[in-house]
Image: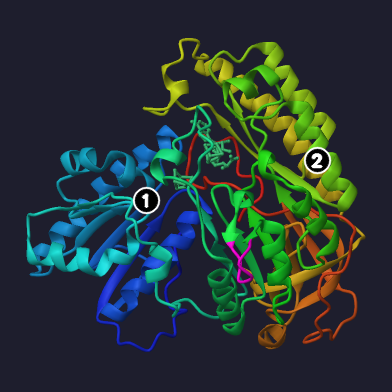
Amino acid sequence: MKPRAGTGSVTKSVTKKLYIKTYGCQMNVYDSERMADVLAPLGYGLSDNPDDADLVILNTCHIREKAAEKVYSDLGRLKPHQQRKAEDGGRMIIAVAGCVAQAEGDEIMARAPQVDMVFGPQTYHRLPEMISKAKRAVGEKVLDTDFPPEDKFDHLPEERVRKGEVTAFLTIQEGCDKFCTFCVVPYTRGAEYSRPAATVLQEAKRLVADGVREITLLGQNVNAYHGDGPDGREWGLGRLCRALAEIDGLARIRYTTSHPRDVDDDLIAAHGEIEKLMPYLHLPVQSGSDRILEAMNRKHTAAEYRHIVDRLRSARPDLALTSDFIVGYPGESDQDFADTLKLVTDIGYAGAFFFKYSERPGTPAASMREQVDDAVKSERLSTLQQLLDSQQEGFNASMVNRTLPVLLEKPGRHADQLVGRSPYLQPVHLDIPDSRHAAMIGTVIDCTITGLTGHSLFAVPVRDGQAGSDSTNSSNTVDSSNSGSPTPDSADRGQERISA
Ligand code: SAH
Ligand code: SF4
Ligand code: F3S
């Protein structure tokens, strides 16, 4: 995923070409957008391709081995572009940002001499300084993988390059203190940090003023949110959602990714009370086996997870759930895997991401002796995939003939087609003449679902001529939805079942 070029309306003149490639989770998508915002005042305008770019940033992901390796092959492909630019008398600065940069800064410098700058996720606000340093000293590399004491969010510009979007990400929390034994995030993103509620609300209001109708709050562990509230108290995620719901013009709120341990009473109540909070929750469980959950340091049992789901569903009966699963964690037996299948069968998911366990250097699980054979991992992945696929298909099929509020986002791939999202984050296609798109994009209209293909639904407006009418989401019917998880780029994931 990469930020699209061309939607910007920042008035500074564009004199340089910027190409950003984003790997990994939505937090990286948000960071890439914010990097573009930091660079716009320096004259950098976003481009869709790296040819001839003055600055290329690879915003990387370290979550699984293949995600990290991809960066090195992309760097190889950039080399001729960089050489060509130099032959023409120009200079292409190549930067590696994100979680691979944080984890393997020195290795990148050694393996890829074409790289000029390497910087970690907490340093983006220092990009202008880093660029001028890289420009001054050809041949000298810039490496910044500190976790600086100052808050990068305090230094990011208010002005956004991308405008006119109906949906937006908003990072409210970063880092993780959970230390699941398989995971690199606590090492790449650092300790957990929550932004003050007032700055989150201010950023949300700005987004809404720019036309955004749906905000997805982001955090590696978003429901661990505990920001300072404007009332001097600490606010949890439920409280924050209530305040966001009061913003006029904001139609929908989502959040991702949540940890079962941090689902508190107030958040459960919020799902029952806040109409704008969509009935969709990505709540990764990873495994259905207590033995494996304990070995993973997930700090909850399968029964506790079921109980949390029961309570959430009591508060919001139509809540659609999605999850992440890891198969082949060290020591996972046939019985452990059977426990996972049982949990999936009992819970019933609207979608999921599933991965083969990938050894990550430096994490406790990587040094465990009982690593599972790749063939066994593949077999388990495909069994789990079949089960989750059939659940997702059933969930999508249950939408047919229902009336759902759809937030209209953009023109479809074909002429006279609009695409929106159901409350459950399913893409919904409607046949609407191009001439009506401008008036309808950004509105929420009630639609009858007429059919489906793959993961997409087809629909017709309940009342034709609803353009401009704006029922906020009210139906408490059904749903599935948002992408929760990191990963769009990893080749070892089973399948990305619900796209962001
Ligand atoms: N904070 C979230 C997940 C962040 S990482 C949570 O706790 O649920 C996103 C997903 O990548 C994880 O949920 C997990 O399923 C997967 N993942 C993380 N490390 C992995 C590894 N070493 N091998 C395979 N999958 C992994
Ligand atoms: Fe933190 Fe999630 Fe990684 Fe666990 S899986 S360490 S909760 S980011
Ligand atoms: Fe980093 Fe997100 Fe990947 S936190 S390791 S980019 S999943």
Image x and y of residue 109, in percent: 18, 44
Along the polypeptide, which appears first: circle 1 or circle 2?
1
Q: Which residue is mark 1?
A: 98
Q: For residue 344, which quarter of the picture?
A: top right
For the point 51% across and 80% down, the residue is 163
Specify the quarter for ligand 2: top right
Is residue 418 in sight in this rendering?
no
> What label sits on residue 284 in the rendered view?
none
| Quadrant of the snapshot with the C terminus | bottom right
Determine whether 339 is above or below 23 in the image. Answer: above
> What label sits on residue 309 in the rendered view?
2
User: Between 227 and 146, which is closer to the camera in this rendering?
Assistant: 227
User: Between 236 and 432, which is closer to the camera in this rendering?
Assistant: 236
For the point 79% across and 39% down, the residue is 308
The residue stretch that appears in magenta? 228-233
Q: Of helix, strand and loop, which one carries label 2?
A: helix
Q: Residues within 10 Å of mark 1 (few under 14, many from 20)?
A: many
Q: Mark 1: is the Cβ under 8 angstroms from ligand 3?
A: yes
Image x and y of residue 479, in percent: 81, 54
User: Which residue is the extreme one toward the right?
Assistant: 401
